[in-house]
Amino acid sequence: MTASSGAPTPGSEPPPTRAFAFDRHMWKEVAHLLLDLPAALIGFVVTVIVMVLGSGLAVTVIGLPLLAAGLVAARRIGRWERARARVLLGVRVDEPSPLRAARTQDGLFPWLWTALKDPVGWRSVLYSVIRLPWGILTFTVALVSTVLLWPVLGYVARGLTNVDRAMVRGLLSPSGELERRIAELESDRGVVVDTAAADLRRIERDLHDGAQARLVALAMGLGLAKEKLLDDPETAARMVGEAHGEVKLALQELRDLARGIHPAVLTDRGLDAALSAIASRCTVPVQVTTELGERPAEAIEGIAYFTVSELLQNVSKHSRARSASVDVWRSGSRLLIQVRDDGLGGARLDGGTGMAGLADRLGAVDGLLTVDSPPGAGTTVTAELPWRERAPGETRDGGRRAGGRVAADGQGHRVR
């Protein structure tokens, strides 16, 4: 991960100057200083001149679009300058989030307004203005030092590039934590929308292909039985018996579908009982330990349930484990879940077992998923979720036992 915009990553800076050697760090700094002038000229011409023209023509129909284009161009130049500083100066600065409404489907005016009030664009314009006189100075001093002041070239280069580093961090970094959080929330919003749409499609498909088709066949069967009720009572009775079996199957499918949406045991009795029910359906013995003084918010509780459900499905399908365990506890403002097994190991977030999608779902609520799975040594998956208190209207019964332990033998039997 990249460092925050306010401070460099450890190791991102050249070693501190003691006795300068003519090494690659110094030559990178000199190259950066010599490139300052052409880079400053390009930035000044592209952004400042376009901005001046746009401001002067603001009363016309092309003025504001030209001004917005100048801000967008300044953003692009800022990206190039961050890349140059990263390569030559070792300064790693987070990329700012993209313009939030800069999409064709939003139309011209939302894009125009977003571009005109973009703080990143305006700071990039300020950077381009300051860079021209500074670029002339650094180019001249670096060139003279390279030709005439060779013994002190390293000290001169380090002093001037330190100013460059400060300018890049101060003017081309994101707008603090809020800017980064906006980018994260925009990404998470897309994950939530896609996940919700996929879940709705799954529910519709299950209803259409399962319970709905079975109920249609049931209605047709009962209609035929009604017609034969007087003429052939034995056949009608047999058809009614078959219909009774279809009703049971339809009810079971509806129960399974409802459990996939939100299980009743979770609402009524909390995570301890709900996770125990999942463990009893696993193909390997699973020990469940919950240490929660109270129940979290329903949304967090539901995500925790489905996280464990998916992880135990992976244990059943892929791990070849002999046993597994589920531990759930609260640590400060976080709800922690750890699922272990003694199987084959080798699990990865990109391994095709749904881990990547699960990580995205957790990330959408500011959660985290980590996988430790060395080959041949089992798998440990740790999930973190934010702890959110239950609203006053949410049920609070159940889930209050601390340290409850449940073992399942993989055959549907549970022992406390």
Image: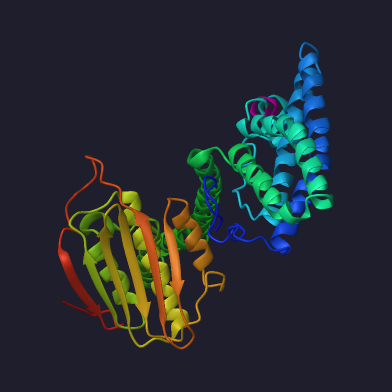
Q: Is residue 104 left or right of residue 37?
A: left
Q: Nearer the viewer, residue 269 or 19?
A: 19
Residue 396 in the image: above or below residue 348: above
Residue 171 in the image: above or below residue 322: above
In the image, residue 344 lies at what x, y percent?
Answer: 46, 86
Q: Is residue 239 visible?
A: no
- Identify which residue is drawn at 69% across, 60% down: 25
Residue 287 in the image: above or below residue 219: below
Q: Nearer the viewer, residue 398 or 209?
A: 398
In the image, residue 285 lies at what x, y percent?
Answer: 30, 83
So how many labels did they put on this image? 0
Q: Tell me the magenta residue range.
A: 111-115
> Which color mode does the image show?
rainbow
Query: Overall secondary structure of the magenta stretch?
Result: helix
- Identify which residue is drawn at 43% across, 59% down: 368
The quadrant holding residue 134 is: top right
In the image, residue 329 lies at what x, y percent?
Answer: 26, 63
Q: Nearer the viewer, residue 202 or 53?
A: 53
- Quarter of the rendering occupied by the N terminus: bottom right
Is residue 395 located in the magenta-colored stretch of the structure? no
- Quarter of the rendering occupied by the C terminus: bottom left
Residue 278 in the image: above or below residue 364: below
The quadrant holding residue 385 is: bottom left
Q: Is residue 233 left or right of residue 182?
A: left
In the image, residue 104 lies at what x, y percent?
Answer: 72, 36
Q: Is residue 82 left or right of residue 173?
A: right
